[in-house]
Amino acid sequence: MSAPSRVSAVAAATSNAALSYFEDQFCYETDCWDVHDALHNGPHDFVLLDVRGTEKYQAGHVPGALDLAHGKIIGSRMAGYPENTLFVVYCAGPHCNGAARAAVRLAQLGRPVKVMPGGITGWLDEGFELAIGR
């Protein structure tokens, strides 16, 4: 009998553990389709932040997103938003950890936050258009 593949060498989680894990992911992230739908059809009940930096933002961003680099997320900048404002953050795509860095900063400030893991790459992969400039 041959050795198990690298896929099956570590047993899968129990169904209950997998259910909990995958359900919990929706508390931490949202996808490009859901953001697109909310931006176009409402309700628009979150603030979308492009955390890549101004130069990249101006070159192309998700329509409706605000330009706020992850390194500039500080308490004084966020003070203008009600405490319960949900922030959705994105960066270049799954190869970039800027969105996770932004999410950490927002969570440290006590702010509700979700990541859009596909970022610009995912947005374009879905066939959605970008806005150019400010």
Image: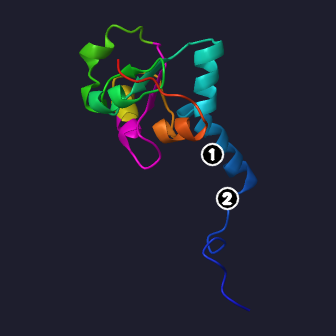
Q: Is residue 90 left or right of residue 56?
A: right
Where is residue 39? Give x, y as percent.
58, 17
Task: State which region is magenta.
Answer: 84-101
Residue indicated by mark 2 = 13
Amino acid carrying label 1: it is: Tyr
| Mark 1 closeness class: few <14, some 14–19, many ≥20 residues within 10 Å | few
Among the two numbered marks 2 and 1 on one chain, the one whose residue lies closer to the N terminus: 2
Disc 2 and disc 1: Cα gap in Å? 10 Å
Residue in view at x 68 percent, y 63 percent: 12
Determine the secondary structure under disc 2.
loop
Residue 126 % position (x, y): 61, 37
Q: Position of residue 50 (x, y in %)?
A: 39, 27
Quick one: 28 or 57, which is closer to the camera?
57
- Give the residue number, with chain letter if any, for mark 1: 21
Secondary structure category for the residue under label 1: helix
Please say if the residues under marks 2 and 1 sit with CB atoms less than 8 Å apart.
yes
Direction bottom: furthest residue: 1
Which residue is at the front of the view, 3 or 42? 42
Q: Quadrant of the N terminus?
A: bottom right
> Callout 2, which amino acid?
Ala
Nearer-the-camera pick, 134 or 65: 134
The residue at the point 55 percent across, 13 percent down is: 45
115 is higher (above) or lower (below) than 13: above
- Is 86 contained in the magenta span? yes
